[in-house]
Image (cartoon, grey):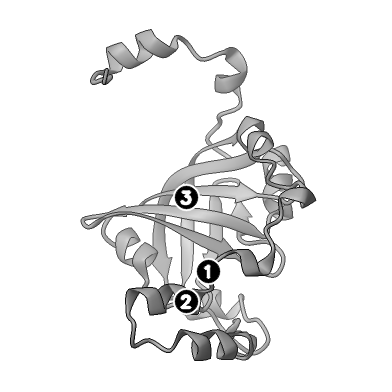
Amino acid sequence: MSILTSLEDLHAHYGTAGEASLVKEIDHLSPAYRTIIEASSFCTLATSGPEGLDCSPRGDDGMVVRIRDDRTLLMPDRRGNNRIDSLRNIVRDPRVSLMFMVPGWNNVLRINGKAVVSVDEDLIASFEKEGHLPRSVIVVTVGSVYFQCARAIMRAGLWDPENKIARGDLPTPGAIMQEIKSSFDGETYDQEWPERAKTSMW
């Protein structure tokens, strides 16, 4: 197996990036980039900490983040599994990376920057949803923003209805956990999940 072990070898192997790959990267939200974020209800949040890396899905009803200004994004931390992997990382290493996706759009928008976890009461209250508040708000300062070319999503056929997997073709969460821990009641977990989700969405 031949392994590339230096930047020199890597650049020699791949060559130079084209102009279009470089000119699209800026340090703030342009009008076009703002429009894409405003259309996105889903993104992934990547963080880094002493234990390693984490990549967390983030979704909301409408915009997944709020744009405070051209260099600042606000992301409410809605209810989840309470592992707080992303938050534990951010308080120790502020570097974050976001990838925004819009159904039907073959590109993705990427933002790299730094974040803090805010528990400001007024800020939290501004994200109230159906009587529920997020536990905190992740405040992201934009360092770089750019769109990724469409090849990956096109190759995957991600938005092609024919590629949608039927609900019964993958193991359920309950089945996964019961496979790991045989005493876990996976069937009951799966049966109770839809109602539990209805009452704990926000």
Q: What element does badge 1 sit on?
A: loop
Q: Quadrant of the N terminus?
A: top left
The quarter holding residue 74 reads bottom right
Which corner quadrant holds the C terminus?
bottom right
Residue located beneath label 1 in the image:
171
Q: Residue at x 29, y 18 (%)?
A: 7
Q: Is residue 91 above or below residue 48?
A: below
- The quarter of the displayed image where residue 184 is located: bottom left
Using the image, determine if residue 157 lies above or below residue 24: below
* Image coords of residue 55 (percent x, y): 43, 55
Measure the alpha-carbon separation of dots 3 and 1: 38 Å
Amino acid tagged 2: Ala
Residue 198 left/right relative to 123: right
Q: Which is nearer the N-term, disc 2 or disc 3?
A: 3
Cα separation, mark 2 vs mark 3, equals 40 Å
Q: Which amino acid type is shown beneath numbered disc 3?
A: Thr
Q: How many marks?
A: 3
Q: Position of residue 166 (x, y in %)?
A: 69, 63
- Is the C-beta separation of discs 1 and 2 under 8 Å? yes
Please give the residue where the numbered disc 2 appears in the rendered image: 175
- Looking at the image, residue 119 sits to the left or right of residue 169; the answer is left
Q: Which mark is residue 141?
A: 3
Q: Secondary structure at mark 3?
A: strand
Name the residue: 72% across, 38% down: 32
- Other-residue count near label 2 (Cα within 10 Å), few / some / many at <14 / 14–19 / ≥20: some
Image location of residue 58, percent across then percent down: 55, 63
Q: Relative to the observer, which residue lies in front, 52 or 119?
A: 52
Amino acid carrying mark 1 in the image: Pro
Residue 60 shows in the view? no
